[in-house]
Image (tube, rainbow, N blue to C red):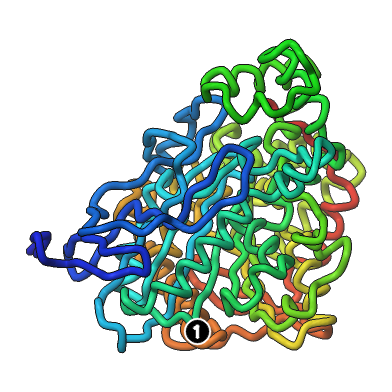
Amino acid sequence: MKTDFLCRTEAPVVQTRAGKVRGFYQNGVYQFRGIRYGSAGRYMSPKPAEPWEGVKDALVWGYTAPTPQESGISDDFLISHRFWPQREDCLNLNIWTPQLDERAAKPVMVWLHGGGYYGGSSIEIIAYDGDNLALFGDVVVVSVNHRLNHLGYFDLSSFGERYKNTGNLGMEDLVLALQWVQKNIRAFGGDPDNVTIFGQSGGGAKVITLMQTPAADGLFHKAIVQSGVGAGLGELPKTRYDVPIAKKMAEALSGDENNIACLETVPLAELQKAYMDAFHSLDLSFMDLVGYGPVANDWYLGDPEEVGFTEHAKTIPLIVGTVCAEIGYRGKLPDRETLSESDTMKYLADEYGNEHAKEIFDAYQAAYPGNAPIYALYLSNRLGSLDFCRKFAEVASAPVFNYNFALTFPFDGGTPAWHCAELPFVFHNADKVPLCHFPGAAVVEETMSRAFVNFARKGDPSGGSVGGWPALTQETENTYVFDLHSSPRTGYDRKLLEMIAKYQKPRSYAL
């Protein structure tokens, strides 16, 4: 394959409001990496990046947000990762664009990464790279790093006005990044009046949070939530431990549990150790660790399923969807495709009870003909996604479109789509992921990428290889199913999902 490359002293250079940045051009796409959009002191609100003289290189990924623990490499074959240096100075973004022309006015797609509000980064997953999506869809792709975990969502408001919005600092970062996009993206060929935010898992949850944040009103115009309703993990903890953790940290670091100011100045390594020591001393769970998120107040108005959608949120066209397995049993059941009916029934009985196993078995076969009924174990949060869509449809003036990524991968005897499995197909990056090299993958990729690009361009995913994708309404539960034979379907698994919600045993998740 011919590779064209350009990175000279004079080009490609773009003038932003703060100063000039130099990227590079490769395979039809201009790339700019690690552009600083802001800076922030620890536990302080972010400020726009300071202006600079001359030309800054934007050739290398920026630092990513620190996490209190090192990341592992489990499941890296299923979804390939990239690990990168972490620093608190992490307010940076990346841009991929097919054209550097202020008159181009291409749709802008701003990616919010997964990892809950705890971990992850804009470059953590190889499939996040925006070059193929920018070229395929003729769009401008932006991905954003921001503060996470206790550095971005630590509610210290009870310790004084200085810390009033510390529970939402990571979201303040994202608002600042979207403001940067509004002021600068035209120079990169993008249309600031046609911005779509999209994110998966924690990124999807951040999309919903931004819809409920008045400071973000007008900064984006469409939104896509991928596995972000419940993030596939079930109910997050309602009790927060910010105050006792903060006091234990202050006591360990200064000898005074009320000396919260000391948290702002100690070296990061000491701060992270104090945080994890406090966390373990309180005997908290994995869900308490990843459950840190935004705090409802007069800046962020709260979960729409609890407080209702804001008037502005009701005007934002939405796509909301899930994958068919989310967090579940992947890799733990041998020969799933060839399990006998009696063995399948044993697994279903263990999950849903002996008296309901056959009922679930039959309902799954009716909803997903041709799939192994053992996959009924994997449907963890599709019902929540549908209910979210229905609540939005009841009150909103904008449409909402629902999807289910129901592809079965030819791996380990058949593996239904897991949490993150759709990412290579959304970004048109199946070629970058070994597991996505199978017959028919290119067709799935074309259809899913096309749907997302269509939506970013005109607020409707229909058209081209997608065909028609009707919105979900109060009367009609329309879902677009992405698999080897992608198509829209209506209410096809509602009965099954209601039984699963009723009969499924509670799950716990180990760290």
Residue labelled with disc 1: 193
Please tell me in which quadrant of the rendered image residue 218 appears. Answer: bottom right
Q: Position of residue 110 (x, y in %)?
A: 48, 66
Q: Position of residue 441 (x, y in %)?
A: 38, 62
What is the secondary structure assignment of the residue under circle 1?
A: strand
Query: Horizontal placement of 74 versus 489: left or right?
Result: left
Q: Position of residue 149 (x, y in %)?
A: 63, 38
**286 or 89: nearer the eye?**
89
Compared to 360, does 427 lie above or below? below
Q: Position of residue 338 (x, y in %)?
A: 56, 42
Residue at 44 percent of width and 35 percent of height: 87
Residue at 59 percent of width and 69 percent of height: 224
Does any portion of residue 376 appear in the rendered image? no
Compared to 86, does 323 lie above or below? below
Circle count: 1
Please tell me in which quadrant of the rendered image residue 243 appears. Answer: top right
Image quarter where the N terminus lies is bottom left
Image quarter where the C terminus lies is top right
Q: Residues within 10 Å of mark 1 (few under 14, many from 20)?
A: some
Query: Horizontal placement of 134 versus 485: left or right?
Result: left
**264 or 474: nearer the eye?**
264
Query: Horizontal placement of 181 versus 504: left or right?
Result: left
Q: Amino acid at mark 1?
A: Asp
Residue at 24 percent of width and 55 percent of height: 56
